[in-house]
Image: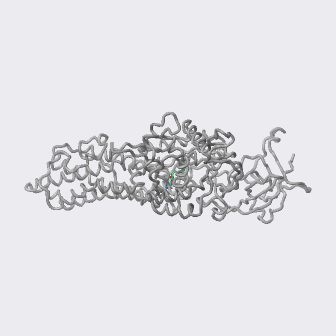
């Protein structure tokens, strides 16, 4: 063994549809894990799912199921996607796994016992989609500085982690280990945005969130979801359990690969927690860029905006194969920066690199060996002309790929491999084997050309193995090599392929795609996807409404109605019909979204006392949670009129 290599992806929130953006980190990590394995290292590759927290709690509630029932099918689907993409992880951890829960409880207790956690009152802003706490000063235009979404004021008893005392230690960590956080720009961002302004202690438990790991010594608290999630990197190895042999074998991690938006958690909070526990730190954290679509980070809500792009990983694999998707993700996105996804960019990568360059080289060469030498690889004679150039590119490939992979630059590693492929194609044009074949006196030269081509292809295929997982074995099979048995790069030495080997004509490895036809088909498929979506729930027009069936008094009694005072009101951006109201019900304040913008202006609404249903399950309208419903009457023409108490009465009064 040449040492160990422990690589991790972030664990994924199973909170909605999986899209091609989610595949990026994992495909990249898989390629690195496979590469290090082929270097002969003892590799552990961890991935999994992050299943606790308010976001999932709310989504499950909206869906009317338990959080576990909500996440289970999404986790199963993610595992299917990893299978389709040939992701060869060593372990898939779920934060709902019993061993993980226990280990998080152990970690939390240790931090408490060491005096790193204390109890106080939390009051501040919380962004549910990011599961992040913010101070007033950190907000950007009153919204979450990370995602730009609404934040909510939260106040409750909490435990705090003494993060503030780690600012200098983290700064020193960066100074002493300039490679710790990559790319460099991310380190500057952490220093300028977080470390220099000073760190604040971090709220690490909640009493209002039930869907989380319970704190053992104070059961009304659950552990903050990020502390729970980050701990996976050691709990997956058995840290805090009876058997921590994997922890002792693999920790510290060699590489935490993550998207750039969660770097703060990995490069500040996680190292601080490890320092507090007295544990070694990961050797490197890498914050990669995003796959953009329509100019934005791909997300569930954006998927609807860019209707024509096919973003479902399973459909993409079914249409083009796992190699095509893996290759695109690893090659197209400059490492560390953002990259753009369109149907067209994917198709053009498939056609230009995989079909034209690689596919053609293999099919032309194997066809020629069959045509000119009856499918038996001839021995090479003396090298001449540009042979040396081709052989040099093949011989230097291992070193160049290593340099690129050490710099965590997978696109560069692939471009080095394709430099050999392209050089071999050029070599065919230079040596014109079809002309050599016509002249018996050139037979020896033709043999050398065929041998050099076969060797270049074999070496390229071996180096491609960590990146794409199907085609290299098919290519190697043409030369009588069992690709599965090629587990290291040792065989990638020029000249190892024996003359006399039977060479099969290559099957079509990457058939060329008719881009125009395919794009038209994708557009048609997108239209039917849209049509197949359940129609938006529309309220029937007043004149279409039927009389409702009779109900008994008990059923009616289930509806709770109260008088509410409108204290503030504004239009909901991007909606013509909706107003967002703040209402007071005695001691309580709530937010309600109501479809009355056509009938009332926000100014008119402030100060009105209205009738409100207060026990409706909260629902999200235009991203805003509505915590009740305001009652209106509507006539035949659709004209609205608010229901109001006829006499002066306090808000919060019950209506019978
Ligand atoms: N659950 C947290 C991570 C906890 S780690 C202890 C989380 N999950 S996530 O599902 O939102 O994201 C998982 C990974 O997918 C992140 O690395 C994220 O950057 C990546 N991507 C999600 N969408 C992406 C793109 N559009 N492009 C590239 N990667 C992006 O964050």
199 left or right of 9? right
Residue reaching furthest to the left? 441
Residue reaching furthest to the front? 114
Front position in the image: 214 or 25? 214
Q: Position of residue 118 (x, y in %)?
A: 65, 48
Q: Position of residue 495 (x, y in %)?
A: 19, 49
Q: Quadrant of residue 245?
A: top left
Q: Position of residue 345 (x, y in %)?
A: 42, 59
Q: Give the residue displayed 51% in from the left and 57% down from the top.
A: 260
Q: Is residue 119 above or below residue 391?
A: above
Protein image colouring:
one colour
Residue reaching furthest to the top? 242
Q: Position of residue 71 (x, y in %)?
A: 58, 42
| Number of numbered discs | 0
183 left or right of 104? left
Front position in the image: 301 or 582? 582
Front position in the image: 262 or 443? 262
Quarter of the image with the C terminus is top right
Quarter of the image with the N terminus is top left
Q: Give the residue displayed 65% in from the left and 65% down from the top.
A: 141
């Amino acid at each position: 063994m040449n040492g160990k290599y422990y690589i991790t992806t972030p664990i994924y929130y199973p909170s909605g549809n999986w899209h091609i953006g989610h595949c990026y980190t994992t495909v990249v990590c898989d390629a690195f894990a496979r590469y290090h394995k082929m270097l002969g290292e003892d590799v552990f590759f961890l991935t999994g799912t992050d299943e606790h927290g308010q976001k999932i709690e709310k989504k499950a509630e909206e869906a009317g199921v338990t959080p576990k029932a909500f996440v289970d099918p999404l986790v199963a689907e993610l595992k299917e996607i990893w299978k389709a993409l040939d992701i060869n992880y060593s372990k898939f951890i779920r934060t709902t796994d019993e061993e993980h829960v226990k280990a998080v409880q152990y970690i939390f207790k240790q931090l408490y016992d060491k005096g790193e956690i204390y109890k106080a009152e939390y009051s501040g802003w919380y962004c549910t989609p990011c599961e992040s706490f913010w101070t007033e000063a950190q907000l950007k235009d009153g919204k979450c500085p990370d995602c730009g979404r609404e934040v909510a004021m939260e106040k409750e008893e909490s435990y705090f982690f003494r993060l503030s005392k780690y600012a200098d230690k983290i700064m020193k960590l960066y100074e002493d280990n300039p490679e710790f956080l990559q790319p460099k720009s991310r380190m500057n961002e952490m220093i300028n945005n977080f470390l220099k302004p000073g760190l604040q202690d971090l709220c690490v438990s909640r009493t209002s969130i039930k869907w989380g790991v319970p704190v053992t010594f104070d059961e009304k608290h659950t552990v903050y979801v990020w502390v729970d999630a980050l701990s996976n990197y050691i709990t997956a190895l058995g840290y805090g359990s009876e058997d921590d042999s994997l922890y002792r074998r693999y920790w510290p991690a060699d590489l935490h690969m993550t998207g750039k938006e969660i770097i703060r958690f990995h490069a500040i909070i996680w190292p601080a927690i490890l320092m507090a526990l007295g544990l070694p730190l990961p050797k490197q954290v890498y914050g990669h860029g995003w796959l953009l679509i329509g100019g934005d980070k791909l997300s569930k809500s954006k998927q609807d905006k860019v209707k024509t792009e096919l973003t479902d990983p399973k459909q993409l694999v079914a249409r083009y194969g796992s190699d095509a998707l893996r290759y695109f993700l690893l090659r197209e996105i400059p490492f560390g920066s953002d990259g753009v996804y369109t149907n067209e960019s994917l198709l053009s990568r498939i056609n230009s690199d995989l079909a034209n360059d690689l596919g053609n080289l293999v099919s032309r060469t194997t066809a020629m060996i069959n045509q000119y030498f009856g499918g038996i690889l001839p021995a090479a004679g003396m090298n001449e002309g540009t042979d040396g150039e081709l052989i040099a590119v093949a011989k230097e490939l291992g070193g160049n790929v290593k340099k690129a992979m050490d710099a965590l630059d997978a696109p560069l590693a692939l471009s080095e491999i394709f430099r050999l492929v392209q050089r071999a194609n050029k070599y065919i044009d230079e040596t014109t084997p079809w002309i050599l074949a016509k002249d018996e006196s050139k037979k020896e030269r033709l043999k050398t050309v065929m041998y050099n081509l076969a060797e270049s292809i074999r070496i390229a295929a071996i180096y491609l193995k960590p990146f794409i997982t199907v085609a290299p074995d098919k290519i190697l099979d043409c030369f009588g090599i069992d690709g599965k048995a090629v587990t290291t790069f040792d065989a990638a030495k020029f000249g190892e392929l024996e003359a006399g080997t039977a060479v099969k004509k290559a099957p079509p490895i990457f058939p060329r795609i008719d881009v125009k036809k395919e794009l038209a088909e994708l557009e048609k498929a997108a239209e039917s996807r849209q049509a197949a979506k359940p129609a938006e729930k529309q309220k029937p027009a007043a004149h279409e409404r039927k009389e409702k069936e009779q109900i008994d008094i008990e059923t009616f009694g289930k509806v709770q109605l109260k008088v509410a005072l409108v204290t503030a009101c504004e239009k909901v951006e991007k909606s013509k019909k909706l107003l967002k109201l703040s209402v007071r019900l005695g001691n309580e304040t709530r937010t309600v979204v109501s479809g009355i913008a056509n009938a009332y202006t926000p100014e008119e609404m402030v100060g009105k006392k209205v009738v409100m249903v207060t026990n409706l399950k909260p629902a999200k309208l235009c991203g805003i949670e509505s915590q009740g419903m305001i009652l209106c009457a509507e006539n035949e023409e659709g004209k609205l009129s608010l229901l109001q108490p006829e006499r002066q009465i306090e808000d919060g009064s019950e209506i019978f």
